[in-house]
Structures are given as structure tokens and as C-alpha cells.
Amino acid sequence: MALVLRGGTLIDGGGGEPVGDAVVVIEDELISRVGQREQFPAPSEVLECDGLTLLPGLIDAHSHLGITTVEGVERLAPAVAAAQIFGNCELALDAGFTTVRDVAGIDGGVAQAVEAGLVRGPRIRPSGPLLSQTGGHGDHGPRFLDAHHYAYQGVPGLVQTNVTCDGPDEVRLAARRAFRHGATQIKVCVSGGVVSFTDSVEDAQFSVAELRAAVEEAAARGSYVTAHAHNVRGIANGIEAGVSCFEHGTFLDEATAQRMVAAGADLVPTFAVLRLMLLHWQEWGVPEEVLPRLAGAEEAMAASMKIAVDAGVRIGSGSDILGPRQEHRGLELVIKSELLGPMAAITSATSANAAILRMGDRIGQVAEGMLADVIALDGDPLAEPHLFDDPQRVVLVVKAGKVVKDLRA
């Protein structure tokens, strides 16, 4: 039986003009027809969407569903960690996110549990653990202990936040292990970080040879590498090694943006975390001494994103939020709407993100032949982009043709 979403205004995710009085016909898990109100296949289940706005399921390209505390998930009882992670999956789905790329933490088993219907949540593209150099971003072990004393940071089979590796051979082994655990791409660090204890955001991390080892392993599996990157030295090393996506990009310049365009590399700015961390740092387990690092970061990231947009870099959307209850994932679209305009913000979280995840032929647009990931908002997000930060205004969520949330009156 076909499922028909009838009425409402359609924003298809491709950047085109909204279409009023729309009809979306879903058969099995695919979209079979898109247009305005018309005859639809019978028998059909009709979901009336008059007064709502239909959009593709949103995509978060920078999530950390498993980092429920920066202090170390391994310090929690495994049952507590699992409950928090599964809760974060539900919160993401109910906020309208039908796909997330997890860029440090989630084990492939969690993605399998969601895919099997055992846990309510978005489609998860896990990266496995963050690959870090000793003393680099993500290496949160005690300073007086070498890495072999705290080699596993996480809960086996559930979450591993980081693996410390040095030299091309160790990086290669870490990448192979991540893929063995279900990773669909690899995440590395090419710069220092904000939530870091032994480096600064100005540091460049991993040599080109080390980064190239990760890129080679990903390419061997038809995949890619994305990189935590705040500064241009790290991005330059990543480009030389073949890294295809950069997260944050806080301190970008025009020359580096042009190099990204020439290399076909993407940028995923992450604004939501910068605002939310100031409010929730204690709940997230962030040490207070980290907070001064946030000063000026949002302004610098906004300026860098403008440089990237002007240069022609493809811009994605990622929230980077942490914590045991990850709310306000949609705040990222609200902030991007302020900076880029609502339609560009929507595109960044739909078709652009889908392309960055190398899933542009399956998700990110409401179009015939695509997976039926569709949401409905109560209101007009082009006029009221703050709707994205209110899950109660996300009244309908369809994921792969199945209704997983329905609050329509």
C-alpha cells in the first residue's frame, strides 16, 4: 500500500522554490512520485499535511551520539552509557534528523541496532574512534601516563571515543580496526582542539605521511577521511594527504579556501556546540578551564564560512553537540539561517550533507527514486527558522518510508 503525504508546502532540499499544495507518494521505502495535489495510487494511506511544510529528513554531518560525557564514557556503568546513547538517538530522530554521521565514538553495533529496529534513531554513519596523535586533540588520558596505560577509551561494542596512534603504520592499523568495527568513514585530527588538554587550536597534528596512510585505507574500501581542523596548516596537510572533508574550519583564509575548492574538499562548520557548551559545560563533563578557548570562536568560524562560501567550497551542517541528553540539534540550522539565509541553511543540512556523506543518490532531497526520508514542520521555516530548534514543531517524521513520529492534530 502506498503512503501519500498530501497538502502542505514542499521544500525539496535542492534549493529550488517551494511548491504549494504538494503530494509525495511513497511506496515501500522509496519516493515514487512528487508533485502537486493529484490522483494518487489506491489503496493508499493518506496523511493530510495542509498547513505544514514538507522537507527532506535532516542530516547532521557532525554528531557525537556516544560522547555523553567528556570525562570519559568508560567511567559510566555500561548500562547507563547505553541508555544515554539510545536516548540521544531518539532525540535526534524526534528533532527531524533521519541520518547522522557520527564523527567519533559510536560503534558500528549501535548503527546495526538502529537499522534492525531495536533502537529508535536516525540512520547512523559511524566513524569509529577519533584517530589522534599522542598529546593531540582527543588524547584525554592522564598526562603522567603513556597511552598504553589507557589504550581503550570507551565501552567495547558501544562507544570508543579515541585511539592514539603515531607513525603511518599505527594510523593504518587504527583505520583498519575502525572499519572492522563498522566504520563507514574515518575521522582524524589535523589540528589541536577547543576541548583539549595537551594542545592548542594553533597546533598542526599528524604528518602528511600519517594522514596519507588513513586516506589510503579508506580509499581501499571505497570510503574517505574527514578531519577535525581549526587552522590552515592542518588543512593544508590534510589536502596534501587527500583528506576530502574538514570539520569546524574556524581559522580559514582565502588561499586555503581556494585550495579546498581545487581539491574538491568540503567544509562542515559547527556553530551550535559553541553556544551550547557555555550553558551545559558541567552537564557535559567539560572542565571549566576549557571555556576561555571558546572566546571569539563563533565570530572566527562565521568569518571563515563566508570566505569558504565566496570561494565556492561546499558547506555542510554539523551540530557537534555532546552530553547525556543531546537536545537542540536543530540550533545549527537556526544559526546558519542567520548567517547564510534559511534556504541555504536547509540545503546545507539536506542535499549538501548527503553529497558530503557520499549518499547524494539516496538521501537529502524529496525526489522520485530517493529513500523516503521526509519530515513535516508546523510552520514556515523560511520565515521562522527557529522552528528547527523546537522538536514539538517537527510534527511528522518518515524514515525510509515508515512513519516514526506523528504529532499532527
Image (cartoon, rainbow, N blue to C red):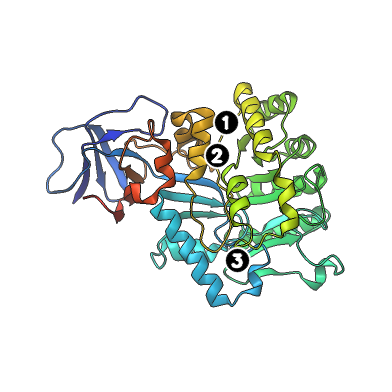
Residue at 77% in and 48% down: 192
Residue type beneath disc 1: Arg
Point out which mark residue 314 bears. 1
Estimate the spatial distance between the alpha carbons at disc 1 and disc 2, rounded to whole Å. 8 Å
Crowd rating for badge 2 (residues with CA inside 10 Å; few <14, some 14–19, many 20+): many
Residue at position x 35%, y 51% in the image: 392
For residue 356, the mark is 2
- Which of the 4 image quarters holds residue 363? top left
**Label 2 secondary element:** helix
Amino acid type indicated by mark 2 = Ile
Q: Nearer the viewer, residue 220 or 63?
A: 63
**In screen coordinates, is 43 left or right of 210?**
left
How far is mark 1 from mark 3, CA to CA? 30 Å
Q: Position of residue 39 (x, y in %)?
A: 13, 35
Q: Sequence-wise, which precedes: disc 1 or disc 2?
A: 1
Image vertical order of residue 333 relative to residue 109, above or below: above
Q: Secondary structure at mark 1?
A: loop
Amino acid type indicated by mark 3: Val
Q: Quadrant of residue 285?
A: bottom right
Tag 1 and tag 2, C-beta contact below 8 Å: yes
Which residue is at the front of the view, 362 or 298? 298
Depth check, front residue: 237 or 83: 83
Q: Under tag 3, what secondary structure?
A: strand
Residue 159: numbered disc:
3
The outermost residue toward the top is: 310
